[in-house]
Image (cartoon, coloured by chain):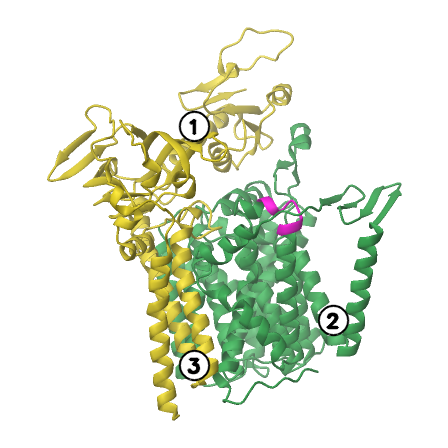
Amino acid sequence: MSLKHQHFLYWTLSGCFLLLTALFLLKSHHLSDHPLNSLQPFDVTTAIEVPPGRYYQTNGLYHLDMTGTTQLVLPIKKGLENMSALDTLVINNLDSNQAVNLYLTAQLTNRDTQTPFAYKQKLINNQLSINELDYGWQTAAKISDVALVVESEISFGFGDNFDNRISWQSIQLTHHGLINQTQKVYTGLSTFVPLSFSSINFYSNDFVNIYKAFLMWLGIWLAINFVIFIVIKPAPIHFIVGIILAWFMVTIVFAHNFTLQGQFNQNRFAQHNNHLNHMDEKLYDMAQLIDQTITEQNNHSSDIKIFILGGESFNNKRLKYHLLQYNVGVIGRYEDVLKTLNRDNSYAALLPPFNSICEPQEPSQETPTLNILVQTTQFCLLQ
Amino acid sequence: MMKTILFSIGYVLYFMGLGIGSRIAVLKLMKLETNKRRLSSLLAHGLFMGMFIHVLLLNGLQLFGNHNGMALVIVMVLFISCLGLIVHTALVGDGIHKPSEISRQQVITISLIALASLLVIWNSYQLPNLAWDTWTVWVARAKQWYYHGLGVSFTQPNEWLDSSSSLLNLSSHYPDGVSLIFYPMLFFSDTAKPMVLGLYLMMYGFLVLLMCNRLQKANTPFYLRLFLIVVMYTTPLMVNHLLLPGYADLMMAAYILLIMLGLLDYNDQPKPALRLLIICYALMLPLIKLEGWVWLLVALFSHSFIMWFNQKQRLIIMAIMAATFLLWFLWGGITVKTPFGPLIISPEEINLFNKAYIAFGFTNVTEAVFNSLFWQLNWSLLWFGLPFLLLFMVRYHHNKAQQVSHLFFTLAFSLILLLFYLTPAAKYAQDYTAINRIFLQLMPCYILLLFNMLATVANQTKSPPIVNRD
């Protein structure tokens, strides 16, 4: 066989196997054994209970107003008997401006052990959101208290007023056999997964199944390519070009997310890149007020110590970070701190929830008396 | 933005000046022959060597007091001296780098790296200092030095309550290296984030350039070198560590790779100057993170095992090690009570005089390992190459420096798996908080090995592979 024919044969076989592997993976993805004709999709759009004034319809879209709240739990009024057979939740034309996280919650009973357990699955935040509900749902003996939970995404940056409104055309519980699997994979791969406070994992485990199918497809294809390469023995560059092509397919997914991340960052941080979010900005202002109060009292003495009372939570850590010009620490053991506070130049700061330490106390011999220097709804500073 | 870019470039130039100058000074003092490199390699190694000298210097100055001003003056004096030495060597001496024409390929390579870096800047510039470890650990400690002095002592909560002079720092047992690199940035920027981004991009860019230079030496086709740049800038988790800069893991990964590159260079030209360079990079590992000690020991073992012994001796050593392990396992380990505390090295636990303790127990973390290596899309398709790389390691002939790299990578990867399967660190694999960060530290090394393999495949004719190992 001539070299030209070898190359032609290599790419023909490679292309065929690329398509065959894709078809095989799409068709083999079958979890439920319910006959399709016995199942009817369940329309959730109008079956959810929403507090008055928050849910309205215009131009064929249903709008949910999140103004003044960070979480809405929308219970489904009436469930179905064979709900576990409906293993896919589809939200059509979802427009959330990436400002919310959506979850499906329920109370499930395990088929084998008959023990109830709480169920919560994060839903895909994309214009077409196709969510295969996990094994726990599909094998549950009983499903009750089903609810759609909408939470504002306030952890990152600074949203705008329009972030309070989300909309959708319809929400349906359906069977995976009734939806287009290619569309499902495409939707999953194009879903934006934002950066979080830590860069330890690129994608969260919520979306592992989608990437697993995609990477498995390319991995199997590359393995087949290797075998064809060994058998047909074309020039090595052809095998390497196959690897490069596979890499670029994954890179399209990555580049899409990268672009969305850039837009997200511009929207959320363009005017506020000194602070992580609204809470952090407030904590910075508190630190400034604490600094001002202490400076007025001590003329910024170098041996000032500040105890932030409580555990190592985000808020306490961040307040500490903003007060690092002082000898500052987060301490959970109040009794130890109270003894130490007797010394000059020691201060204690407490963030909500406040306890009795932030209430004016009568002087007593057993416990030291603390002066409340500043108290607002957001923090109290004691000496 | 312009000010930040200028500060970042200035800071990188400071490292380069410090690195190149001190290298010239040490080689002149030791009367060693200078190993001249092409300009891009000189600047890259200058940057990384400068970071090492900077950390070493400030670590030393911490012992002599608490004055930030004094520390900065000493650093500046040293930097100016280095600059003087570089200028003197370049103008009066025999030059500092190997004169070479700028090739078109080099221009394309550098342009592609610059373009990728600009895209990362576009994406990350607006972000505040989000990365958790960066602001809670590394930048926080640098800030404490900035406000309270470089020599200030840190304590844990129990001692801190009664101490009036020391500061509370829960991660004070961690090495100072990364914080010392961030520390001068705080004199120019309150959050340090834009400058950290600038430094990380330069560091990463030069690392990629060094990888390309190395592959060029191995006659790797240009298209594969371009593909390497694409891989380095599109592997999702590595790009994440650039978008949220400030983690120590990427820095650790860079120095592990530098040791590998240094060994490969030394194999080509065994000059004492290169040996010195490798030693400095190896010493940097424990100055970055605690696990640096582990990588240092693994690197030392791999190097001595391959370089000092022939194949027969290696087999004898491996047999002795296996027999010792078997005896130790069957015997139940060693348990000795000493006045300093118990010394236990058994299959159940290791207790070094109650100072260091670890208990062994199997936890099945296979799902976490597979998710992190494959299905979370952290590393794109890279780990699919592992079986082929292992096959390549044993089937082809490699020089000794390559064998050291192979052994280091295999041992380090096995150690990571052992750590997560057999120790309480399993919980950090199962909650995905540490597993990918540890893998990240090996990634540039792994990617270079993969590309060496691809280069061999690309360069091979149709003849079967040569099985010939010394």
Q: Which residue is denoted by mark 2 in the rendering?
A: B305
- Spot occupied by residue B356 in the image (x, y as percentages of width and height): 74, 45
Return the chain for callout 3.
B
Element type where label 3 sits in the image: helix
Horizontal arrangement in the rendering, residue B52 relative to residue B245 (left or right):
right
Task: Please tell me how crowded label 1 is: few (under 14), some (14-19), or many (20+) other residues with Cα within 10 Å.
Answer: some
Residue farthest toward the left in the current orientation of the protein: A59
Amino acid bearing label 2: Phe
Chain A colour is: yellow
Whole-Å distance between the Cαs marked 3 and 1?
Answer: 59 Å
Judging from the image, mark 2 belongs to the subunit labelled B
Label 2 environment density (alpha carbons within 10 Å; few <14, some 14–19, many ≥20): some
Q: Amino acid at mark 1?
A: Leu
Identify the secondary structure beneath mark 1: helix
Is residue A126 at least partly visible in the picture? Answer: no
Q: Quadrant of residue B162?
A: top right
**Residue plotted at (76% across, 49% down):** B347
Q: Nearer the viewer, mark 2 or mark 3?
A: 2
Residue wearing tag 3 = B222
Residue range in magenta is B420-427
Which numbered disc flags the more N-terminal residue, 2 or 3? 3
Quarter location, residue A110:
top left
Chain colored green: B
Instruction: Name the spot of residue B125 as percent of width and height, x first.
Output: 37, 53
Can residue B389 be seen by looking at this rendering?
yes
